[in-house]
Image (tube, rainbow, N blue to C red):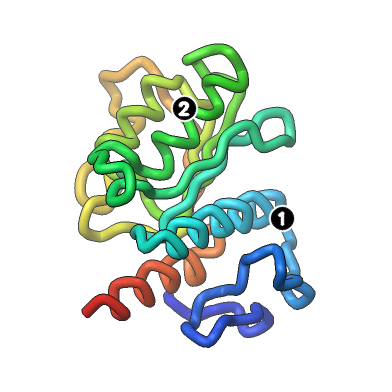
Amino acid sequence: MSQIDPSVVLCGEGFPCLTTKDPLPAIVLSTNDELWMQEALSCAQRALEAGEVPVGAVVIRGGKIVGRGWNRNIGDHDPAAHAEILALREAGAFVGNHRLGDCELFVTIEPCAMCAGALIQARIKGLIYGADDPKAGAVHSVIRVLNHPQLNHHMEIRSGVLAGRCAEVVQVFFKSRR
Ligand SMILES: [Zn+2]
């Protein structure tokens, strides 16, 4: 499950080099989902550089990024500052609407219950995530918040996109802090 694509260039610490200084010649992205997930991974890298749990998210509308976010709980002293929330806020401000029914959110790790709730509030069209979160995932791993039969907003969900790399970044982070 946590196998890294062998063609990916890795930093010394085992996660993909995503800084702008480092070219990414070896990564071959075969689908749009992988392309946008790579952008979410770039956001996760920003969190990592700030000492935050490396989760990243982007909101896509009409083939363009309209929101980016990465975890900022520690730096902002904000329990709600998850990548998805921050990306949704930026997208809402950009679009000029708190409803984002023509947008998709890409996030590296399965959303928690708070973020799943925010995706419903945003009426987001689709959620695409990388790796499952067996400790807090609210799509299917721990609880199922999304697409509940009694909720009137349902969304498309795809998972497992670049899952190995998305999980690896988080695993390396927690291993380094033990
Ligand atoms: Zn969350």
- Give the quadrant of the C terminus: bottom left
Does 129 sit left or right of 150 as displayed?
right
Disc 2 marks a residue whose amino acid type is Arg
Q: Where is residue 109? Give x, y as percent.
A: 40, 55
Dot placed on the residue nearer the N-terminal end, 1 or 2: 1
Which residue is most to the right? Answer: 25
**Real-space CA distance between mark 1 and mark 2, rounded to the nearest whole angstrom:** 26 Å
- Could you tell me which residue is drawn at 43 percent across and 63 percent down? 48
Q: Residues within 10 Å of mark 2 (few under 14, many from 20)?
A: many
Does 84 sit left or right of 31 as displayed?
left
Looking at the picture, does residue 15 appear above or below residue 120? below
Which residue lies under the disc numbered 1? 31
- Could you tell me which residue is drawn at 50 percent across and 46 percent down? 57
Disc 1 marks a residue whose amino acid type is Thr
- Could you tell me which residue is drawn at 55 percent across and 64 percent down? 162
Which residue lies under the disc numbered 2? 89
SS category of the residue bearing label 1: loop
Q: Quadrant of residue 52?
A: bottom left
Task: Return the residue nearer the eye: 65 or 30.
Answer: 65
